[in-house]
Image (cartoon, coloured by chain):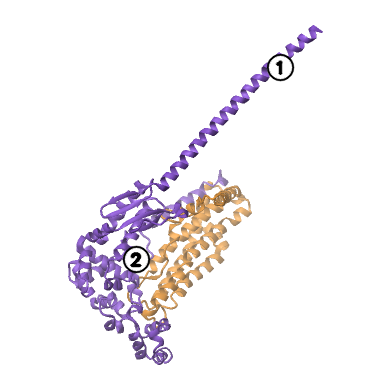
Chain colours: A purple, B orange
Amino acid sequence: MCDRAALLALAAVLLAGPARAQDRDVLRSRIARLERELRSAEVAAAHADSVAHMRDAPPDTVRVGALRVLAPPGIGGEARAGAARALALIDTAFGTATDALAERRFTLVLQAAQRELRPVPAGTIGVLTTGSTTDIDQRLVWAAAQAMASLNDSALSTWLQGALVPNRHPERERRGVYVALVTAPSPAGQRCYQGDLDACRRSLGLVPVELALDDWYNAARRRSVVQELQDLDAVRAAPRLSSACLTAESDADCLAVLRRVPHSALPPPLPAAARFSLLRSAVELGGRGAYTRLLSTAGRPMETRLAAASGVSSDSLLRTWRAAMFAARPLPVTVGPRAGWVALAWGVVFAFLALRSTRWR
Amino acid sequence: MFRMMLYTQWKWSRLAVVLGAVGAFALPVLSVGQFGASRASRWEVQAMLGSIQAWGVLYPVLAIVLGLSIAALAWTYDHRGRHVYALSLPIPRWHYVLLRFGAGAVLLAGPVIALWAGTLAATGAATVPAGLHAYPTTLALRFALATLLAYSLFFAAASGTMRTARYILGAIGLIVAVDVLSAMAGMNLHIFESVFLRLIVWPGPLDILTGRWMLIDV
């Protein structure tokens, strides 16, 4: 009996030992897991604090030349780099007039935070961005162009038909204008293409519309314009004239209808890009002070203002503009030597692949 | 031997070559239909250019179809005969492939010359308004290069085994599958698009097929 009790006690001791050891291991692993959980909770809490701090923190103010940009915390570097690139481009278009932007402040708003969109600070211009340097650059250029357009007098705004947006690739715009010059349904545009500078003036809107209207469209185009503008009050108010224009194809009546239409409603013979490109040519000729001179000559005829901005006569300006359009002429179906050799080389590569086909090995 | 090879390939591909030549001649002629009108006024130039551009899409399509047809027909009878004829000839395999390739390339000259003749005839008959220019020779040269390139590509593909074809198709399928799965997971990898752009944009091999194919342009 005693022996049996002793054996039982020994068995209990032997069994209890590993069990206790097992408990300790389990406990240790639980403690380690809890410590890990605690650490990850601390990291998450720190991140949440950081996000909350960033959201509530005041924006960074970035000053680059005349540009003042309020950037959300965390993208100050990108904002500075983007603003610097934007300013360099803006300066090429507006020169010294860019100083006017010092009166404006641009607030960058991250698209990621759009759901929590809060009103931008009063007196600033909101600029929605992804936060990358390139995007900030592009958005700031666009916003600055709109801000500069708001400084334009009404005559300049009406003539320009939009905001002059600084362009890194003016040759693309000129290419489009060249195609328009070649294909535009306008006698003035056609003669401008052939080198008649007076026709260029007419097609670019530098001559009062009432004097140039006869030259803007031909008879067929006049009819189609009347057709397009049929819903205008000025056209509806002259049913007999518009009917004679459209049904009897009376060109004199078409012209009479068009003379009643507000000038701003008449589609110009060349696209707005033509006027932008002319202004860009004037700024290129006139240097950094060109746009300032353009603004300072408000009240004078547009041709005089452009000549003043460019610092050359209007004839020289138009000649330069026209030469730039021709220089940007698109290159159609070209097969340059390089492209030809590359195509041939690829042909040889594919032929060599056929020689090396696994079928032959 | 080359003449024999050329003759047999001509017999196999003559229908494709003749149809291709007729199409190549007709394409530029049809594309300038509006320009051929005696009263092509300046007001219609925009529409004419639009028409020329719309027809222009067919030049690379024709080049691809011609290249594919001639390349596939060059190998059809070899594949059908399990290449016994090629293996029985006392010439190295590369020499045989070169002869096949050369014969096909020579046959492509027919449609290319037909296109050149078509462009010359079309531009000669058309009234090209001031400011626009005709580019018959450049267009024909470009068509020749595009056809040769398409032919080389399909010739290489057709010379391969079924296993090679399966690998190529499998690789394309894998890329598409990865794109689809990544899109479903919210990550837009656009691998297929990226690979495709590398193929068709300079200096990619298919760059010659893209761009403007305008017989008459500014």
Q: Nearer the viewer, residue B192 or A63?
A: A63
Residue under mark 2: which chain is it in? A
Q: Quadrant of residue A167?
A: bottom left
Q: Image height check: is A56 above or below A270?
A: above
User: Rounded to the nearest whole Å, what is the CA distance between mark 1 and mark 2?
Assistant: 93 Å
| Dot 1 and dot 2 within a common chain | yes
Task: Report the number of discs.
Answer: 2
Residue extending furthest toward the left? A312
Q: Which mark is residue A330?
A: 2
Q: Image height check: is A255 above or below B207?
A: below
Residue under mark 1: which chain is it in? A
Tag 2 secondary structure: loop
Residue extending furthest toward the right? A1
The picture places residue A255, in percent across and down from the top left corner, at: 34, 87
The picture places residue A194, in percent across and down from the top left corner, at: 27, 76
Q: Which mark is residue A109?
A: none
Disc 2 residue type? Pro
Q: Nearer the viewer, residue B97 or B199?
A: B199
Tag 1 secondary structure: helix
Asked whether the viewer can see residue A329, the reply is no
Q: What residue is shown at x 46% (from left), y 50% (from top)?
A: A349
Q: Image height check: is A124 above or below A261?
A: above
Mark 1 = which residue? Answer: A15
Asked whether the viewer can see residue A163, the reply is yes
Residue extending furthest toward the top? A2
The picture places residue A282, in percent across and down from the top left corner, at: 23, 66
Mark 2 surroundings: few (<14), some (14-19) or many (≥20) residues within 10 A: some
- Looking at marks 1 and 2 on the same chain, the residue that comes earlier in the sequence is marked by 1
The picture places residue A304, in percent across and down from the top left corner, at: 20, 73
Q: What residue is shown at x 64% (from left), y 23% (from top)?
A: A23
